Image (cartoon, rainbow, N blue to C red):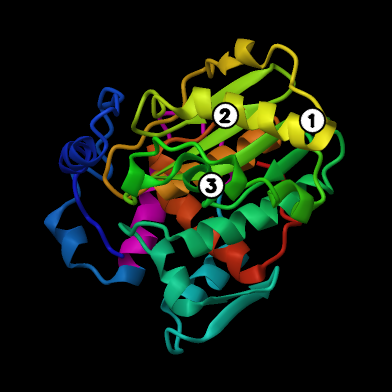
Amino acid sequence: RSFPLGYLEYQHWLQRVVPSAEMHELLPHDAEEQASAEDAEASGLELLRRLCAVARAKTSRRRAVKQLTPEEVSVAEAGLYGDGGPDEVLASRFSVELTRGQLQCLRPKTWLNDEVINFYFKLLQERSKKIEASPSCWFTNSFFWNKLSGGPLKGNAEYNYKEVRRWTTKAKVDVFALDYVIFPMNIGEMHWAMGAIDFKKRGFRYFDSMISRPHPNFVPFLRRYIDDEHKAKKNGPLPDAESWDLLAIEPPVPQQSNGYDCGVFTCCFAEYFSAGKQLEFDQEDMGDLRVRLAARVVQADETWDSP
């Protein structure tokens, strides 16, 4: 759904829904927050093109995000603005059919839905298997954290391992043989972030483009999860599970400066972190990255160039 709130409006609303949230300080970005009246009146396709042009024109900083290719722009525009009804299937893979209507969450100033995020995480899962020397990862869907913690209706305050106990069995995954478990998080049904269990560093990571710290139960519940998973799959408790803690992310994660790009940031956090790359993107890249995500999802192919 389109949700053109400014950063401060979105921040205040999010704080009401998630009272425990500690917000990042607003950075001095102006590309989205200071959108002109001309942009507000533009068509969706024209606005998409303007945002991409603005991002490309920012020459005062080193550009780490690769420039869009003509093919990416063409595929994305056809999917986001082409002819066809909202129920037309544009991508079919992983026993999932993604429709034109679902893909349209990648239009400018629109919240991402769980269908697109989960589909992209599936692509990242396949991609991680094919990149040589990349970290070994398991990507869950967006329901993992809320199933484990009771979800927003219970304030993420009710631990329930039974809800996710069979997930690794179904996925044929031994998490203790991995580097990372990576999962998108739907915060209060209105904000996207990413969590990760880091088996190399024996701790947990939280990637959020607006909230500086995770839910108070994030670390305790993940500790219990890895211990219960070890008991269930390895026939005994995980040694020193209580020593696992929240790990700092350096440099700090990029921050959004509007009320709608959190899902794009979350997809990029997952892509870069799972590839062992620095998070070298920011708010100014979001116009291009929406286009890139749309093209990749429509093509349903994980064999793109590295970030």
Would residue 70 be visible to someone looking at this image?
no
**Label 1 with label 3: CB-CB less than 8 Å:** no
Q: Is residue 247 left or right of residue 286?
A: right
Residue at x-position 29% and y-position 24%: 22
The residue beneath circle 3 is: 267
**Residue 131 spot, x, y in % from top left:** 82, 43
Q: Residues within 10 Å of mark 1 (few under 14, many from 20)?
A: some
- Name the amino acid type tagged 1: Phe
Mark number displayed over residue 294: none
The answer to which quarter of the image holds residue 244 is top right
Q: Residues within 10 Å of mark 3 (few under 14, many from 20)?
A: many
* Residue appearing at x 62%, y 10% in the figure: 243
Q: Residues within 10 Å of mark 2 (few under 14, many from 20)?
A: many
Q: Which region is colored magenta?
A: 46-66
In this orientation, which residue lies closer to the viewer: 266 or 171? Answer: 171
Mark 2 or mark 1, which has the lower sequence index? 1
- Mark 1–mark 3 distance (CA, rounded to whole Å): 24 Å
Residue at 57 percent across and 79 percent down: it is 90
Is 64 contained in the magenta span? yes
Q: Secondary structure at mark 3?
A: helix
Question: Which residue is identified by label 1?
Answer: 176
Magenta includes 109? no
- CA–CA distance between discs 2 and 3? 21 Å
Q: Which residue does the numbered mark 2 point to in the structure image? A: 222
Q: Quadrant of residue 228?
A: top right
Residue 116 drawn above or below residue 230 = below
Q: Residue at x 70, y 50 (%)?
A: 166
Gap between marks 2 and 1 measured at Cα: 14 Å
Chain-order first, disc 2 or disc 3: 2
